[in-house]
Image (cartoon, rainbow, N blue to C red):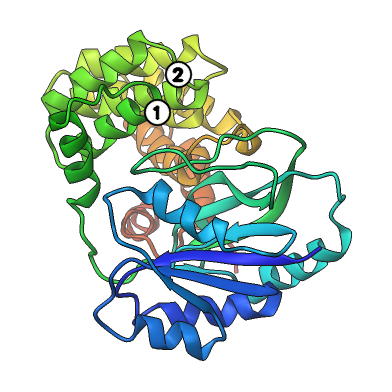
């Protein structure tokens, strides 16, 4: 099979070459839709052999992405943002996928890693619809936080795309678009309401975000968004000083699916702040026992399933006077983040108590 790499860009001269250097390995065609660049973005795209088209920006990401897909001529359309990176290992996997993908596959989901630690391990990831069959009627929806609704024969791949943003960007853009939609009389529902709430939360407008998340949870929505909305509602309540209500929001997430590590960790922190060490230990252990369901497609914060519960279990057991258990969890946390401030502090503390690993 063949791939049309389809991108929408604007003023991306700092990162576009990095992305296209990856894309040229697996793409049979590169489509770049430029929405009004005033730097060397278009020239850089042309240097990589891309077919470059202009597009009048309409505050509508779906419209721009659909314009790029409309220009594609290969078997499948694949999208990347300019600040995305495909590592050499994942480039090889994509080349292999071109040789092995079942021709009846309509869509391939790939993990999108949007935050990493200093060693390149994922901290935050989720699955996205990355590759779709051309000519099957797949269309982007949503003026912001756009999406293609999965349908047909959907395959999950172990290929990862890394989002490595450089610079602050326009942090107000998405919220500005949502507020313009509201001013124009559009009613936000479902996915758009959920992401509007997240944009409000990111701008620390916690009371408004809380109300929006409550409204979203009162309606219909994808279960992963409902679980995430509970986590976001808890964050808003916590920021507003409503700690009990924050804990209740975390518990509310259990109504939708098995407990997630993020919610269990949050409950651990709640009881830890109250000095209820045994309760905190229980919930931190629940976080460690839970398993992230990556193929469900929801957001996964990987540290909540390992390092963070373990470093906090160290503290809780120490406060309970169970130093040996505390030290065991210190060693586990150290295996994750040996250079972290918390681990270094604990290392000094335990050495002062006479604890030291052999050798």
Task: Please give the count of numbered marks on the rendered protein.
Answer: 2
* Vertical comparison of 197 with 43: above or below: above
Specify the quadrant that holds the N terminus.
bottom right
Is 44 displayed left or right of 238 in the figure?
Answer: right
Disc number at residue 117?
none
Determine which quarter of the picture holds residue 90: bottom right
Mark 2 near mark 1, Cβ–Cβ under 8 Å?
yes
Q: Position of residue 2 (x, y in %)?
A: 76, 66
Q: Label 1, on which residue?
A: 191
Which residue shows up at 27% across the image and 52% down it? 58
Task: Kindly report the distance in space between the C-alpha atoms of the residues bearing marks 2 and 1.
Answer: 7 Å
Determine which quarter of the picture holds residue 315: top left
Residue found at the far bottom of this picture: 47
* Vertical comparison of 233 with 255: above or below: below
User: How busy is the neighbourhood of tag 1: few (under 14 within 10 Å), some, or many (20 plus)?
Assistant: some
Which residue shows up at 48% across the image and 41% down it? 147
| Nearest to N terminus: mark 2 or mark 1 | 1
Which residue shows up at 51% across the image and 51% down it? 331
Instruction: Pick whichever, 298 or 289, lies toward us.
Output: 298
Q: Position of residue 307 (x, y in %)?
A: 47, 46
Q: Position of residue 232 (x, y in %)?
A: 31, 29
Is 306 displayed left or right of 182 in the figure?
Answer: right
Q: Label 2, on which residue?
A: 221
Secondary structure under the numbered disc 2 in the rendered image:
loop
Secondary structure under the numbered disc 1 in the rendered image:
helix
Which residue shows up at 41% across the image and 49% down it? 63
Q: Position of residue 99 (x, y in %)?
A: 87, 65
Instruction: Pick whichever, 250 or 288, lies toward us.
Output: 250
Specify the quadrant that holds the C terminus.
bottom right
């Amino acid at each position: 099979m063949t791939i049309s790499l389809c991108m929408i860009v604007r003023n991306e001269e700092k990162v576009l070459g990095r992305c296209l250097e990856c894309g040229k390995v697996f793409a049979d065609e590169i489509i770049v839709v430029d929405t009004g660049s005033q730097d060397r973005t278009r020239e850089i795209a042309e240097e990589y052999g891309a077919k470059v088209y202009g597009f009048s920006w309409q505050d509508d990401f779906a419209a721009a992405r659909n314009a790029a897909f409309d220009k594609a001529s290969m078997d499948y359309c694949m999208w990347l943002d300019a600040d995305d990176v495909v590592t050499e290992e994942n480039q090889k996997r994509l080349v292999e996928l071109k040789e092995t993908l079942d021709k009846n596959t309509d869509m391939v989901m790939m993990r999108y890693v949007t935050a990493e630690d200093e060693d390149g391990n994922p901290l935050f990831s989720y699955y996205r619809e990355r590759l779709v069959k051309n000519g099957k009627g797949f269309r982007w929806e949503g003026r912001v936080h756009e999406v293609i609704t999965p349908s047909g024969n959907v395959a999950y791949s172990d290929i990862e795309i890394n989002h490595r943003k450089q610079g602050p960007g326009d942090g107000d853009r998405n919220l500005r678009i949502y507020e313009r939609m509201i001013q124009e009389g559009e009613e936000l529902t479902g996915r758009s309401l959920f992401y509007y709430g997240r944009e409000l939360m990111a701008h620390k407008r916690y009371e408004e975000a809380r109300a929006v998340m409550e409204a979203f949870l009162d309606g219909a929505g994808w279960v992963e968004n409902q679980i995430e909305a509970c986590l976001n509602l808890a964050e808003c309540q916590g920021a507003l000083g409503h700690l009990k209500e924050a804990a209740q929001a975390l518990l509310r997430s259990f109504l939708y699916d098995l407990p997630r590590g993020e919610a269990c960790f949050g409950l651990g922190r709640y009881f830890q702040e109250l000095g209820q060490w045994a309760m905190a230990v229980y919930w931190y252990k629940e976080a460690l026992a839970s398993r992230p369901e990556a193929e469900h497609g929801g957001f996964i914060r990987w540290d909540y399933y390992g390092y963070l519960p373990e470093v906090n279990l160290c503290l809780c057991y120490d406060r309970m006077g169970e130093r040996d258990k505390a030290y065991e969890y210190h060693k586990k946390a150290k295996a994750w983040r040996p250079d972290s401030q918390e681990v270094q502090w604990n290392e000094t503390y335990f050495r002062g108590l006479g604890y030291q690993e052999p050798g």
